[in-house]
Image (cartoon, rainbow, N blue to C red):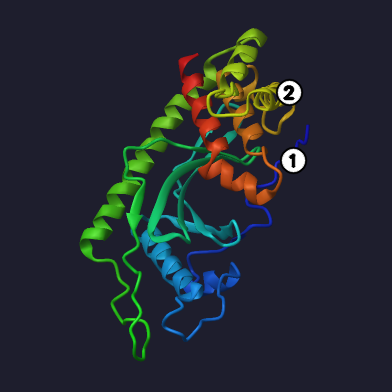
Amino acid sequence: MNRSNEKLWEGIGVEVSSSLSSREILYKAKLDWEVSKIPSQRPKSHANQETFRFYKAYFDAGNADIEIAGSLDGARIIWSLARLNEDFVLPGNDEVKGYLLLASRHEDREKIEVQFLTLRSSCNSMLKIPTKARPTIKNSFRRSFKSTLPFLSESSLELDEEISQRIKNTVELGRKAISGHAIDAQQLAQKKVDEKIAENYMKEVFKPDTAKENGEESEEQAQVNIQTALDAIGVAPGQELESAQMTAWGLLTAVTYTADRIGKTQDSRLRQSWFGANAKIKKKALDLALKL
């Protein structure tokens, strides 16, 4: 199997910092397209500017440090990752970092999706952490076109106190969820498993939904994924660490590493890891690991 531990956004996202303005972040992420002056054609560059202004304001309100910005699916999805500094370390110096993901889709730019994720440093696999926080927020920086100059309304692009407090509450719930996951991870790292448990676990994680998927083809792909994940238990980056050596945590991280690399392109792998089928696989893996 490919033992690469490159980051999922390699070649897609770019590193940025909180010292940059939203326009500088936009420029660095190559999302600062030409602006049309025709009122009837809403320029995507204005939409991106408003999106990144809101992202930066959101991260600042939530005391999160922006690190990565990029786009997916031909820039139909605009996203950014910020470090929460809500980290933990498992036995063997297995470092796990907490992140906040904001993403919006071209079809509905007013709605911003909010996710809380962890990134395992040794293999760069990611896991969405369930929270009680609202999964979306409205982009209050969206402005409407006018028929006269300036074509865009000059409404204030600042967070009001109500929205700012809502953001702080959401981020606090995300931090608590990651702290709770850290406790679960410690327990998973202490839970020893054998080869039979590992095999049954992988079969359950990757079991296809025959009611929704193409029967024979999905069964074949499931078998490939099962074997790949079983191999990953011993050879994937980070599996040599004390926390992962034939433990429930090692089974979970073998799945996240495998799932993050299912897909034909870097773009599709990242999309599926955050928003699609591979995200569901990882959620199922976490749920089943906690039941071992």
Residue 21 at least partly seen:
no
Could you say which quadrant of the image residue 231 lies in?
Answer: top right
Task: Point out the residue furthest to the left here.
Answer: 162
What residue sits right under mark 2 in the picture? 231
Could you say which quadrant of the image residue 90 lies in?
Answer: top right
Q: Identify the amino acid type marked 1.
A: Ser
The picture places residue 133, in percent across and down from the top left corner, at 32, 42
Residue at the spot x=42%, y=80% of the render?
40
Quadrant into which the N terminus falls: top right
Q: Identify the amino acid type marked 2.
A: Asp
The picture places residue 115, in percent across and down from the top left corner, at 43, 46
Say above or below: 105 vs 271: below
Say above or below: 47 vs 62: below
Residue 99 at least partly seen:
yes
User: Which is nearer the eye, 273 or 213?
Assistant: 213
User: Which is nearer the eye, 124 or 141?
Assistant: 141
Residue at the spot x=70%, y=46% of the render?
6
Around disc 2, counting alpha carbons within 10 Å, would you say few (fewer than 14), some (14 to 19), or many (20 or more)?
some
Q: Secondary structure beneath disc 2?
A: helix
Label drawn at residue 286: none
Label drawn at residue 4: 1
Of marks 1 and 2, which one's residue comes earlier in the chain? 1
Q: Secondary structure beneath disc 1?
A: loop
Name the side, left or right, on which 263 lies relative to 243: right
